[in-house]
Image (cartoon, rainbow, N blue to C red):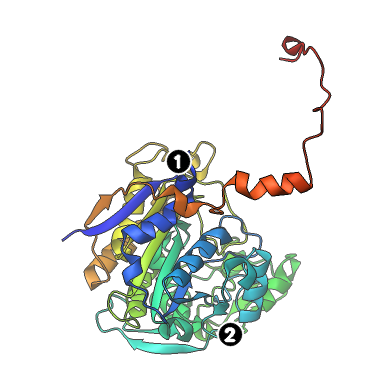
Amino acid sequence: MASKVYFQDDRAMANEDSLVAKMVTLFEAAGFEEIIKPGDTVAIKVHMGEHNNTGYLRPVYVRALVEKVKSLGGEPVVMDTTTLTYLPFPARATALDHLKTVERNGFNSGTVGCPIIIADGYIGADDVRVDLPEGFVLKEQYVATGIALADAMIVLAHFKGHPLGTYGGSIKNMGVGCVSKRGKHNLHLGGDPRWGLKARPFHPHLCRGKSCDKWMLCDNVCPEGCFHVTETSIEWDASRCTGCFACLFVTMPCGVTGVADEFFDISAAAIADSALAVTKTFKLGKIGYLNMAIDISPWCDCVPFSDRPFVPNLGAFSSRDPVAIDVACIDMSRQSFGMPGSIAEEKGVMFPGIPKLSACGSFVGVSENIQTNTGDRIGLGSKQYELIRPEAGDPTKFLYTQVPTGIKFAPLYKMKPVYPEGGFKRAAEVPIEEVR
C-alpha cells in the first residue's frame, strides 16, 4: 500500500500561505497530533547549520513546532548531535562548539522556546547500541542517548543536496543526525578495510612536502596522528585511520589522497541502515517527518558556506514514512527546471526529467536513489506514495493576535495621537511624469 505524503507548494498570497503556516497545516494533515501524548518528551530533530552556513532552516520553523507540541501537552526538546571531526577546523564536533555555533545561527532556548540539547554528549560518546541484523551494510548502530530516550520525535529536515548521501532529507536527518560520533564513524565506514578511508588510494609523490604553504595543516589535521610531512613528501599510517574525515578537504584537493571505489555509494546505503536503527529506539508510530524543500543548495548545511540553489523552492512535505517523503521530494526536484547560474547549469541538468541531485549534490554522480532504495529494501519505509495536497489551514489560527486593530489601538491613539492635527504638509502638485 502506498504511503501518504502531504504537500503544499511555496507560493504565498495570504497569512495561511506562509511556509510556517503550511508546515503546521501539514503537521495536522499527516496526523502528527496522534503521535504526541500529554507528558511525552518530544525530540525535534533539526540541523541548525554549520559556522557561516546560511542555507539552514530558520529558527521560526522550529519555534512553530515547539508551540504546536506544547499545545498538545508534549514537552519539546530541540536536539542534534556532535559531528565527526570532518573539517580541519570543525565548529560542531563538541557539544560546546556546537551550541556556540548554533547560537550564532540564531538558535537558543529563547528563540525556539525550549531547551536545545546535544544528544550524544560532550564529544559524542553518549549513545545506545542497537542491533541491526536487517541492515544492508551496518549490522549494529549507536544512537544518541538523548534521541533514544525521547518518547516521540518530529524530524524536521531541510531537503537539499549532500556530498556523501547525494541528497539530504528525512532519512539523512535521522540516519546521520540522530546517531553519536561513534555511530557516524560506523555509517561513514570508518576503519573498513575495503570501502573506508583506510582503503583509499594514497599518492605521496604529489605532495611537495614542507615547500607547500599548507604543510603544517596536513601535519596536524589528524586526531590519530596518521600524517607526517617530510621535507619533500608526506607519510600516512593507514593502519591508524579511523575515517574521521578531518583530512578530507585538506589532502584530497591536491590529489594526495582519494576515496575507495564505491565509498560514496555504500555510505549512502549505510545512512538508510542507520535511520532504521534510530526508529528501533521508538515505539511504533511515534515519529513524524517534515521536509522543507526550500533553499535547495548543492551541499548540506554541514559545510561552512551555501551555494546558490540548483532548483527553485518546491514547498513543504509531511509523512509518517521517511522513505516515501524523500522519494516525493526527489521526484519533484527531478521534474523541476534548474536554476540559471547554478551548478545545475554547469552540469547540464537544467531541464525537467533529468536527475538533479546525482549531478549537483554528489562529488562523482552517485545515484540519488540509493538511500531510498535501501530504505525500501530493509523495511524503513516504502517508495510507493500517494501525494495529497491539503487545503490551506484556517487563517485565524495563524494570526499574531486575536485582538482586532481598532480595539487595540483606539485607546492608545487617544492617549498618544500619531496623526498630526491638520494633517501633513505635501506638495500641491506633483509632476510625476518628470521622474518616471
Residue 254: in sight, yes or no?
yes
Task: Indicate which disc residue 123 carries.
Answer: 2
Residue type, mark 2 in image? Ile
Q: Considering depth in this image, is 355 or 11 the residue closer to the camera?
A: 11
Q: Residue 11 has which mark?
A: 1
Q: What is the quadrant of residue 381 in the picture?
A: bottom left
Q: Quadrant of residue 214?
A: bottom right
In the image, residue 238 above or below residue 289:
below
Please tell me whether residue 401 is drawn above or below residue 110 in the rendered image: above
Of the residues shown, which amino acid type is indicated by label 1? Answer: Arg
Q: In which quarter of the image is residue 17?
A: top left
Q: What element carries label 1?
A: loop
Is any atom of residue 94 visible in this view? no
Residue 431 image offset from top left, x and y in percent: 77, 10
**Residue drawn at the location 52% of the way across and 84% of the way down:** 120
Q: How crowded is mark 1: few (under 14 residues within 10 Å), some or many (20 or more)?
A: few
For image coordinates 55% across by 79% down, the residue present is 118
Left or right of 268, for residue 162: right
